Amino acid sequence: MKNVTVALAGNPNSGKTTIFNNLTGARQKVGNWPGVTVEKKEGTLKRNGYELKIVDLPGTYSLTPFSIEEIAARDFILDEKPDVVVNIIDAANLERSLYLAMQIMELDRPVVFALNMADLARSKGISIDAQRLSILLDVPVIFTVGNRDEGMDELVETAVRAAESFPRGTSGRKVKYNREIESLISELKKQLEQHFPGDQPHPVRWTAIKLLESDQVVAESLAERSPDLAQKMTRLAAKSRFRLETLFHDDPEIVLTDDRYGFIAGIVKEVVTLSPRKRADMSRNIDLLLTNRFLGFPIFIFFIWAMFQLTFSLGAYPMEWIESGVSLLSGQLDILLPHGLLKDLLVDGIVAGIGSVIVFLPNILILFFCIALFEDTGYMARTAFLMDRVMHMVGLHGKSFIPMLMGFGCNVPAIMATRSLENRKDRILTILITPFMSCSARLPVYIILAGTFFGTRAGSVIFGLYFTGIVVAIVSGRLFRSTLLRGEDAPFVMELPPYRVPMLKSLVIHMWDRSKMFLKKMGGVILVGSIVIWALSTFPRVETYSRDYSGEIEKLNRQGHIAMAAQGEHGNAQMPGQMVAGILELEKLRNQEQVERSFIGGLGKAMEPLFSPLGIDWRSGVALVTGLVAKEVVVSTMGVLYGIGDSEPDALKAALKKSGMTPLSALSMMVFVLLYVPCLATIFAIWKETSAGWACFNLLYTTSMAWMASFLLYQGGKVLGF
């Protein structure tokens, strides 16, 4: 089986990732590009004796190394030399898309053009002569409709043919620059071939063009090969740049860009025919409502409320099924295993800890499905547009809201995504307020507490928490901008992609990609955390209890057997329910005393003065401390400390009610979970992206904010009689 490496390149919102998902399905792996934190996606596809390794390059508008996305995309094509580059082109925006295409063709790799969203182009009255475009640029051109899975087979076959024909084939027709520019390129190319003989790591013509554009990355690459010769080439390039500036009275970069767009304009004139649109632009009409100055924001709030209402109400059914399965497993282990530490570890530690968290998987899946729906329809970009005015209140712009929105899934990649912000102060400010965006790891805590104490209003309560996080982020941002990070507002222009009907397959892939992290934690941090919490709550073993629990349990057992014998020889004789309840209650009291006198009980009692003003008991206080590792551990810790390793459905909810927790104290705890630092991974991400000082500041600030907000809420609620 032959291996072919395919690089998918394209502008943001060109449908590139949709095509990637169509081709690879679930056969994907996610990592980071070398040296940067931009996400790297790879997938595989086997077809007709070929195994295709498909790499989804970051979406970029050019290959000029101004952003980390552009650097990652360009370096992959240059250094990894994929067998073919498939350029996904938005057929409705051909002229803009061809700018990236021209730069890709200068890299001397086989190229295939996929004119994507061809249906959208036709609906706008845009007709493209693909055959003519193929002839003019000397590259294969095909039509695709990614969200309908159309043209995928032809795309794969064309890409394989292009890869197999190289180098006999072509990498496309290059831009023909102004005669004076071509002369300078030829001279630099000649000098490069003389000074750096032999095999060139990069195309020589492309290197000459980059020197004219004063590309520092290329200059540094030459210096690594030969510092002396690189200096000479830099001087020659400087003379050439000066000549261009003298002739055209403008920067060489602008002169070259103008020539590219001139070449592109000629191509577009040859291949594009515009006809009167048969129907109104649907995206524009929808935007009249969804981005309306007065209606847009309330509609956005409604969509977010509906998302959390759906997450809670629809997720309740599969949640009950999973909880019943966990309870059944716990009960069977309780029956089958002999009494001892192994049984306690499995039932009270692992099953109680992991089981109390895994029941929330349906809710996590629904949440990520809704987020994927917002992204794939094009609505997510509108939210950044709507929030632009709000973000200006804190001296930021709508572009900063995009990483914050990502924080609804996980704060770590959201913090990494701030690298797309050019201004360092904007980056630091966005990083500092992003942890207030409630990540999916907090959702299990909200669901268990809101579901226990607020019933049918749980969805609205959870929505209120997420909205509170946004408000606190904005207020904190205003505070930081006026004190620690003073700066001017930056201008912001954001592209609004057309609305699209998403494919169910694409939605499911996006949902699953994000939910896998939650499942991986089951076998990682949550498993380890559950075992550690169980051990700390089990040791040291209590030798002498405050009462003779074993004797009382034995006495009730004897009485129960006598009562069963008194029922006669009936085969269905059962121990009286009152005695069974008494035995269970005694076992719970014994377990409770064991926990209170254990290592973790001592820790909890020591911290109780810190949490009691918030209405939080020592068990929940310990759970909040362990939540510094990961928020999912909060629920698993509560599952262990409240001793729910039995077969009773809704055991943790019942234990919370019996513990004395009230709706007010539950709300206080949820606010604390919302505002204090998300997890250690987030702190390390802040450290890596800023400095140790900012990471420590964020840890102290978020924790202090959480304590004060919970204190004011709980004490204020008590004064008002709640």
Image: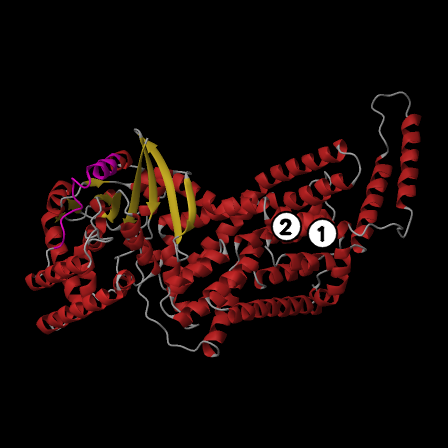
Residue 462 placement, left or right of 424:
right
| Label 2: few (<14), some (14–19) or many (≥20) C-alpha neighbours in 10 Å | many
Q: Residue at x 44, y 72 (%)?
A: 394
Q: Nearer the viewer, residue 205 or 141?
A: 205
In the rendered view, would you say 677 is above or below 245? above
Quick check: 248 left or right of 197? left
Give 282 or 503, whichever is nearer the viewer: 503
Does residue 335 appear anywhere in the picture?
Answer: yes
Query: In x, y percent, where is residue 225?
Result: 27, 60
Q: Is residue 636 magenta?
A: no
Q: Where residue 97 sits in the image (x, y, percent)? A: 22, 53
Horizontal side of residue 374 vs 691, given as left or right: left
Label number found at residue 656: 1
Decide which of 102, 3 is in the foreground and name it.
Answer: 3
**Taking 510 as reference, is 238 above or below it?**
below
Amino acid at pointer 2: Ile
User: Residue 14 placed where, x, y %?
Assistant: 29, 49
Decide if residue 206 is on the left or right side of residue 479.
Answer: left
Which residue type does callout 1 highlight? Leu
Q: Which residues are magenta?
A: 157-175
Q: Are marks 1 and 2 in contact (CB under 8 Å)?
A: yes
The quarter in which the N terminus is drawn is: top left
Badge 2 marks a residue whose secondary structure is helix
Q: Quadrant for the C terminus, please.
A: bottom right
**Which image quadrant for residue 147?**
top left
Measure the alpha-carbon separation of dots 1 and 2: 9 Å
The answer to which quarter of the image holds residue 359 is top right
Q: Which residue is mark 2?
A: 448
Residue at 48% over, 79% down: 483
